[in-house]
Amino acid sequence: MVPFPNIPNPITSKRTFSALEILQLIVFTSLILYFGKTLFIPLSFSLLISFILYPICKWMEKKGTNKGTAIIISLFFVTLMAGAIIYLLLAQVMEFLNEWRLLQVKLKDAATQISIFITERFDISNEKQLEFIKKTIDNSGSEAFSLLRNTAYSISESLFILLIIPVFSALIIYHRQLLSNALYGIFPVERKKIIHEILVETIHAYYNFIKGMLVVYLIVGLLNSVGLAIIGVPHPFLFGFIASILTFIPYVGIMISSLLPITVSWLTYNSIWYPLGVILVFSIVQVLEAYVIFPFAVGSRLKINTLVIIIMVLVGGILWGAAGMILFIPFISIVKLIADRTPTLKSLSVLLGDGEHEKP
């Protein structure tokens, strides 16, 4: 009789992965995330919002409120906060437009001063400068059309995301029991308790993430205000905290929020150095926020080390743009929760951790 070969028992044996298999898994996952971002980005934001609103809905349901009514009330307050941010954004734009005539005069004076400086410093006549500007405008026509097309696409995509997120959030909260049961069914029965613990801690992790973000906005607002006050910009705390709140809208928010203090400082002091000072202050604070404040305030609350936070911010930006820079931080916290409860992933848990319990 031919003996049976030694077949490893899938229950007792531990599956090890080669470096090539890990690399293939990373590449495959990255491709799925990149090409599926139109679905995954709003779904991820919806999951984030549903985890945040779940305790509120659960509390209202215990008080006797209908499940659907509790969801509508909680989403209403979220929409109200989003509407307040949009109102601040539009108010800044309207304030800026009201000052546009005076700004045009300042722009013409600045252009004239720059032209005189170039003529005196580099011996380039005004005619050559105008000819260079004309050629630049002619050559940039196609690029401007491409920029407008990309901008229109980005705006339409953002509107779609803003409209679909509340729908996804409401459905996730409403069908939470069904989704939980489906998740439990994927894993063995003995793992149900651990999966439940991971779900509960994930909700707390997202809650800590939001608390960390509030700390970020407070610190950024104070730094903006102090910087503007040192320069001498009127109403520094107003402009500083508006800029801090609008950083929730990556890139665009800080650019729009800087327009009004730039305009006010230019009109007040009749000098280009004050607007440049405003730009410098906001730029320094943004760098500190991205690489120091955000990783420290958010990462410490999620019990993830700063290096991993920075790496995930960069990876999220590469795959999903600005949305990924926000969403990939909670994602890695979920990975750490799973790694903490999986014996074969202890090395990954130590790598992601903040070293709080590390032996000297």
Image (cartoon, rainbow, N blue to C red):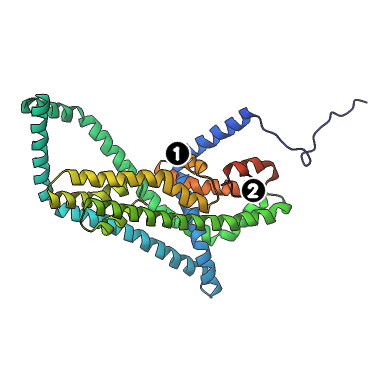
CA distance separating discs 1 and 2: 24 Å
> Is residue 127 or residue 77 the one in the foreground?
127
Whole-percent x and y of residue 330? 51, 49
Pick out the residue farthest to the front: 360
The N terminus, quarter of image = top right
Q: Which residue is mark 2?
A: 340
Residue 179 in view, yes or no: no
Q: Is residue 265 above or below residue 128?
A: below
Whole-percent x and y of residue 129? 10, 28
Picture disc at residue 212: none
> Is residue 344 or residue 276 the one in the foreground?
276
Q: Judging from the image, what secondary structure is the residue with disc 1 in?
A: helix
Please, what is the three-letter code of the amino acid marked with disc 1?
A: Leu
The image quarter containing residue 204 is bottom right
Whole-percent x and y of residue 27? 54, 32
> Is residue 175 or residue 300 the one in the foreground?
300
Please, what is the three-letter code of the amino acid marked with disc 2?
A: Asp
Whichever of labels 1 and 2 marks the residue nearer the N terminus, that label is 1
Q: Which residue is mark 1?
A: 314
